[in-house]
Image (cartoon, grey):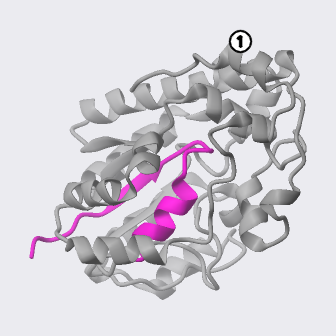
Amino acid sequence: MKKSQNFIIFFHEKEGTSAIIRILNNLRQISIVHQVNDKGWEPFDKHNCGAMTNKNLFKCINEIYSKASLNFSSLNKTYTTTANLPLEEFDTSSAIGFKMRFASPSSTHSKWILRSGKLRELYQRYKSKEFKTSMYKVLSDNEVIVFLAVRQDIFRKALSKYHGDGSGKRGHLQFKVASGELALESIPKIRIDFDRFSSFIEESKIELCNQRSLYEELTSKGIRVYPMLYEDFLENKSDFLEDIVSKLDFEESKKTVHNALDKGSEFKKVHPKNISEFVINHEEVEARYGHEYIKW
């Protein structure tokens, strides 16, 4: 059996990664880093780890990827300096991975930059030179494989962002549905305001542009990097999972992959393909923005 590789998933939002990492965690040869009590599946996002310094961030990441020499007590001593919960212990002989935004937890979160209307600053201000240099080094030193979460369907990504918590405010419906706080059939329809929706279209385009830039930068550093297309996940989850496994340089039987998918995750796709099911003025919206799709 080949030695499995460590990996990281860089994401923005509305790209299916919450479901994907749970499914990956169902595979025996993969361990997804998260907090104890099935919490904190984005362990280095500010809402979980607090305003962690870059020094502690990269110390933690280096320790996680050290595998055999990993000391969980030492790791959690550093991690809980700012985090609300410690990290769950995991199998160090497996392929170790986690997802995070490509930004320091101590920096201003992208959504505040976006809300300020300074969209073009998203890539430069959000990702300091110090953070990028240190991240590239830790990935290269530990031979980490990078997956970039990408959603090509700009139109539907923007709709998901706009719909937010179900009322048109920013948020994540899938978490409410997964927790049982909200039933799919009880989500009311919304009317889309074109001026506001245009900003979500622009935001989604910039996020995809950022992933392209990141892909080029990582490649130039000699780091193995692959796009992780949300549309591929929707089209054929089995092929999608098998492709990830092959890129991590180990083998799983089709039966094992199918079992991981059958076990699934608590997350369900919230938005149907037919937007008339949740958008009142769907004909106008689709006529104006339905073509917004940028192929990777």
Looking at this view, is 205 or 87 the one in front?
205
Left or right position of 184 against 2: right
Q: Residue at x 48, y 60 (%)?
A: 20
Residue 226 figure quarter:
top left
Q: Tell me, yes or no, whether the highlighted magenta stretch contains residue 225.
A: no
The C terminus is located in which quarter?
A: top left
Q: Residue at x 63, y 26 (%)?
A: 155
Q: Compared to 236, does 65 lie above or below? A: below
Q: Is residue 111 visible?
A: no
Residue 161 figure quarter:
top right
In the picture of the structure, the residue carrying the numbered disc 1 is 288
Q: Compared to 128, does 104 lie above or below? A: below
Q: Amino acid at mark 1?
A: Arg
Q: Position of residue 82 (x, y in %)?
A: 69, 68
The magenta-colored residue range is 1-26
The N terminus is located in which quarter?
A: bottom left
Q: Is residue 208 visible?
A: yes
Left or right position of 19 against 2: right
